[in-house]
Image (spheres, rainbow, N blue to C red):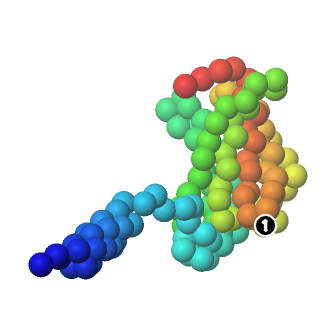
Amino acid sequence: MKFTQPMKNYGLVILFSLVLALHGCAAKGPATVAEQGEQVTLTKVDSRDVDGKTEISVEGTNPILQYTSFQLTEPLRLVIDIAGSNIGKLPDKIAVNSGGATDIVPSQKDNIARLEIGISEAVE
């Protein structure tokens, strides 16, 4: 007696179980604004000196959940991209002139608010 048909069924069951188990290991794509919550509107950007360092605070209508930062050269500046947000009614340029920071230039691209902080010297 041959048992070829049941072996095919066991193979399909094992394959299906493996696919279901590995599906949970798949990488998730970037979160959308709906998954992050409501869009943030930036309302205030301030700077102040704290213990000989310049502290820049950013306020918005909702908590800022996700951002990235990196440095650029020529001119030297620190860039902060805030996903799921807009610059609202921030001015075109915010003067800082404190410590190593010279100014902050807000801009908008798609669903990302960008703050470019001009710096006078490279710092960590």
Please tell me which residue lies in front, 3 or 97.
3
Q: Is residue 20 left or right of residue 62?
A: left
Which residue occupies the extreme top position in the image?
Answer: 121
Which residue lies at the image location 65% right of the left edge and 59% below the top edge?
83
Residue 4 position, x and y percent, is 23, 74
Residue at x 56% of width, y 66% of height? 31
How dense is the environment of label 1, judged by Cα within 10 Å: few (below 14), some, or many (20 and up)?
some
Give the residue type that dot 1 points to: Gly
Measured as percent of width and height from the top left, residue 68 is found at 60, 47
Which one is nearer the viewer's eye here, 74 or 46? Answer: 74
Residue 12 seen in the current view: yes
**Which picture quadrant has residue 99?**
top right
Q: Identify the residue at horizontal 21%, vertical 79% (top origin).
A: 6
* Residue 65: percent from left, percent from top: 53, 62
Q: Which residue is painted at 81% across and 26% down in the image?
A: 75
Quadrant of the image occupied by residue 86:
bottom right
In the rendered structure, the answer to whether residue 26 lies left or right of residue 110 reads left
The quarter of the displayed image where residue 1 is located? bottom left
20, above or below 56, in the image: below
Instruction: Name, please, the residue furthest toward the right.
Output: 92
In the depicted structure, whether residue 117 falls above or below residue 88: above
- Residue on which the image places disc 1: 88
Q: Secondary structure at mark 1?
A: loop
